[in-house]
Image: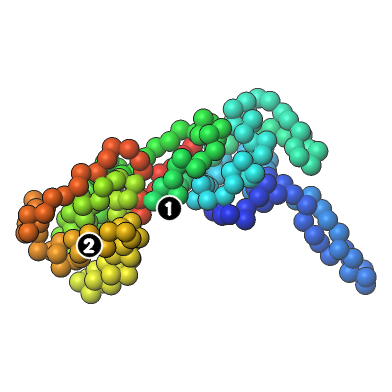
Amino acid sequence: MQLHASYAYEDFIEGFRPRIAGGESGTVQFELRPGPLRRLADEARASDDDRCLLIDEINRANIAKVFGELYYLLEYRDDEIRLQYGDSFSLPANVYLIGTMNTADRSIALLDAALRRRFHFVPFFPDRVPVAGLLQRWLERHRPEMAYVADLVDRANLLLPDRHLQVGPSHLMKPNLDADWLNRIWKGSVIPYIEEQFFDEPDRIAAFELSRLQGQTDDGDAEDGGDEAEPTDAGVAGMGPESPTGA
């Protein structure tokens, strides 16, 4: 499932939904319907197998509004509480929640602090395992003639001042990747993203042009001798890889 700004408690746990009653009158009635979390919990309660709910873009919704009483149940799995609409509910121990987020889109600092205490955070950076070298390995296996593209991405990332902003591998892991598609992807996806990061410093964009990066030496030094910014140690990889969290 994927969260968004309009997602609410009623969408995630349970809420009243309209339905057309039988008969000629077509009367609209409301019934309490379970959301994805409650349905998964019911399945887990009837089974010994683990159940996992993957929540994409977890930082795009109002988490406190969406999770409601789940904050308490994430921490106290053995307890049972009464939900907003009156039913008793507990979260089975074999239910796992994994959330993904991209801090290039919205800062991790905007996450509810109470939620952050209940999740483990695992960052994914293009220059650290398991993402480091992923594009190179994929290209060598599927598009060996385009393996040089991994070096171009690495050079571009060296020019970015923050790991939150790094270009991930997913843009270029395309089975039909060739020189023409590389140019299209770079002009249509990578450069617009870079322009957004440096909207108040347009002179820096030229260093990310594909022709400029292709003209650099193998060790990543620019032909014109320009300095490259070192990435910081804090943050989560931007663009391609996302950082999952789990509780």
Q: Is residue 39 visible?
A: no
Q: Does 197 appear above or below 97?
A: below
Q: Residue at x 65, y 44 (%)?
A: 65
Foreground disc of the pair 1, 2: 2
The answer to whether 220 appears left or right of 171 in the picture is left
42 vs 149, left or right, is: right
Q: Which secondary structure, mark 1?
A: loop
* Residue nearest the viewer, comparing 74 with 194: 194
Q: Quadrant of residue 97?
A: top right
Does the rendering let one see residue 110?
Answer: yes
Mark with earlier residue (1, 2): 1
Residue depicted at 35% across the width and 41% down the height: 235
**Label placed on residue 130:** none
* Residue 38 place in picture, x, y as percent: 67, 43
Element marked by disc 2: helix
Q: Which residue is mark 1?
A: 105
Given the image, on which type of amino acid does mark 2 rest?
Asp
Q: Is residue 183 left or right of residue 50?
A: left
Q: In which image quadrant can residue 51 be found?
A: top right
Badge 2, how many Cα within 10 Å: few under 14, some, many 20+? few
At 65% across and 25% down in the image, what residue appears?
Answer: 78
Q: Is residue 93 above or below residue 35?
A: above
Number of marks: 2
* Residue located farthest toward the bottom when viewing the structure as drawn: 180
Cα distance, mark 1 to mark 2?
A: 23 Å
Percent coordinates x, y for residue 4 in the rendering: 56, 54
Query: What type is the residue that disc 1 sits on?
Result: Asp
Q: Position of residue 85 (x, y in %)?
A: 79, 42
Residue linked to disc 2: 203
Q: Position of residue 12 (x, y in %)?
A: 65, 48
x 70%, y 49%: residue:
10
